[in-house]
Amino acid sequence: MSRGFTLVEMLLVLLILAILSSIAWPGYAGYLTKTRRMEGKVALIGAMQRQEQHHALHHTYVAFSQAEPVAGLPWWSGNSAATSFYELDAEACPGSELRDCVRLRARPGTANVDARFTDPECGILSLDSRGAQGASGTSSRCWP
């Protein structure tokens, strides 16, 4: 004769699953954030390559944003704005003209991309045409 599980056995299995989930979730969440941060960095590097091509042809960089898009320079980091985690923009470096230096920024989770994503550890990622990499967050390990 076949016998089912008792209530105590079922509760014990659920307790074990809850404990394992609570241990695994922070590591998984950290992994997701790092993966999404990599999307932002790759988008910045790709946009900088396109900026350098534009500079080689026109002797100036070009500013862009979601409000003022430029053909060939997407203002989002992923395949489309709706599925991206970062919004990109470009402006002249502080204290410089746009023909001399451009600073690109990747802002996480704005209203124009996936607003649910946040990255308090690194915040806004930046890259300029002089090679300076930066982040507005508290971590010093955002650009390893």
Image: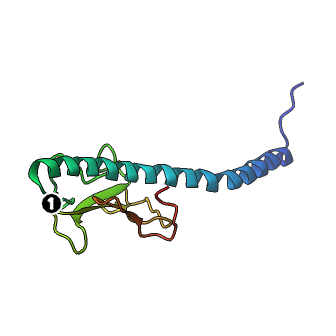
Residue at horizontal 33 percent and vertical 50 percent from the top: 45
Name the one closer to the observer, 142 or 23.
Answer: 142
Vertical position of residue 17 compared to residue 129: above or below: above
* Residue 14, image x, y percentages: 75, 48
Identify the residue under disc 1.
Answer: 68
Q: How is the image coloured?
A: rainbow
Total numbered labels: 1
- State left or right for residue 101 relative to residue 131: left
Residue at horizontal 19 percent and vertical 46 percent from the top: 53
* Residue 29, image x, y percentages: 57, 54
Query: Residue lying furthest top in this view?
Result: 1
Query: Residue lying furthest left in this view?
Result: 58
Residue at horizontal 29 percent and vertical 57 percent from the top: 88
* Residue 123, image x, y percentages: 43, 66
- State left or right for residue 25 relative to residue 101: right
Disc 1 crowd, CA 10 A, few/some/many (<14, 14-19, 20+): few
Residue kind at label 1, given as amino acid type: Glu
- State left or right for residue 2 relative to residue 84: right
Q: Secondary structure at mark 1?
A: loop
* Residue 83, image x, y percentages: 35, 48
